[in-house]
Amino acid sequence: MKGFDNKWKDFPDFIIGVTKEIWEDRVISSLNNYYAPDIIVRSPSSVVKGNKKVIGATMATLTELPDRKLFAEDVIWTGTPEEGMLSSHRLYSTGTHTGFGAYGAPTGTKLGYRILADCHAKNNQINDEWLVRDQGAIARQLGMTSKEYAQRLIEQEGGPEKCVQPFTPEIDIRGPYQGVGNNNAWGERYKTVLNKIMDAEFSVIPQEYDRACVGEYPKGKTALSHEQIDEFWLGLRSSFPNAIFTIEHCIGQEDLMMSPRAAIRWSLKGKHEGYGPFGVPTGVDVYIMGISHAEFGPWGIRREYTLFDEIAIWKQILLKSC
């Protein structure tokens, strides 16, 4: 790969290797090399600029979860080394809550949760990132609802006026990556599926999903087959029935010895004006950053992975309705 260290055999190897080197091998200082000095990291909970802040956040997380491990499930990517490459990296993270931090006093709880991260890299450095962590799964495993954890965060961070504001387009920072993905047929197919779901055409689920499809969703929930997958997507859409759904980035990919896959980063922007998983409608404006991966088989989508941060959604609802 032109511009990248020769020790990386390809782009997925770079993404997976850098992640392990930082988090598990404890070479946290390598963030000074692998992350651009002015990198922008967007997550549903905030937007951060600069690798110094990323280093601080990394040390804080490892203080809470000192045995943390990150298992790479897939890297779906597009681009070229010369122009820059965008990866959508799916990980399963484990760790034991033995240190004090954002999750409160140590509980000894063994945590497991997924992360989806879109990273743009060029010349051996990541310079733009979109990160979604399943905070709802963490809250549940620590014995709290997503709403309770969001309320605790607001109080812990100094109250409604001083707390960290969740990410919205209004506070976004323009980064170096302005691409929208590729035109691969599998990505286009999945894009069509998600657009139909968000247009309330839920009949697309039995049409496009394998009957034995497994869905992995926020709060660490697993869904099996059409009825449970329908329940997940319907619940989300019913909470924000008129919110604008936007495909922000779309990749389709085929690789040897793997199913055809797709990775889509999307958003929902609008009012919380429907009943669903987020309770009684409040009418407040909410922004949701989501990332979805799909794997295709002979009978349609056989695996689906979708994440958004329930804590960030509840935080917006609580902040704007108090």
Image: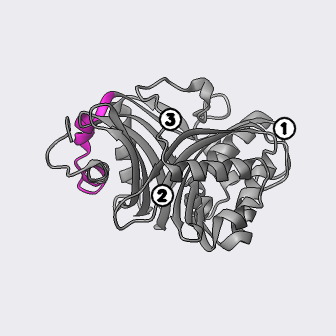
Residue 106: which disc? none
Identify the residue under disc 2: 261
Identify the residue under disc 1: 283
Judge left or right: residue 301 versus residue 18: right
* Label 1 vs label 3, nearer the camera: 3
Tell me, yes or no, whether the highlighted magenta stretch contains residue 21: yes
- Which amino acid type corresponds to the residue marked 2 in the rendered image? Arg
For the rendered model, the colour scheme is one colour
- Which amino acid type corresponds to the residue marked 1 in the rendered image? Gly
State the CA–CA distance, disc 2 to disc 3. Answer: 17 Å
In the image, residue 200 above or below residue 130: below
Tell me, yes or no, whether the highlighted magenta stretch contains residue 54: no
Secondary structure state at the residue bearing disc 2: strand
Q: Earlier in the sequence, mark 1 or mark 2?
A: 2
- Which amino acid type corresponds to the residue marked 3 in the rendered image? Val
Residue at 45% x, 47% y: name it: 117
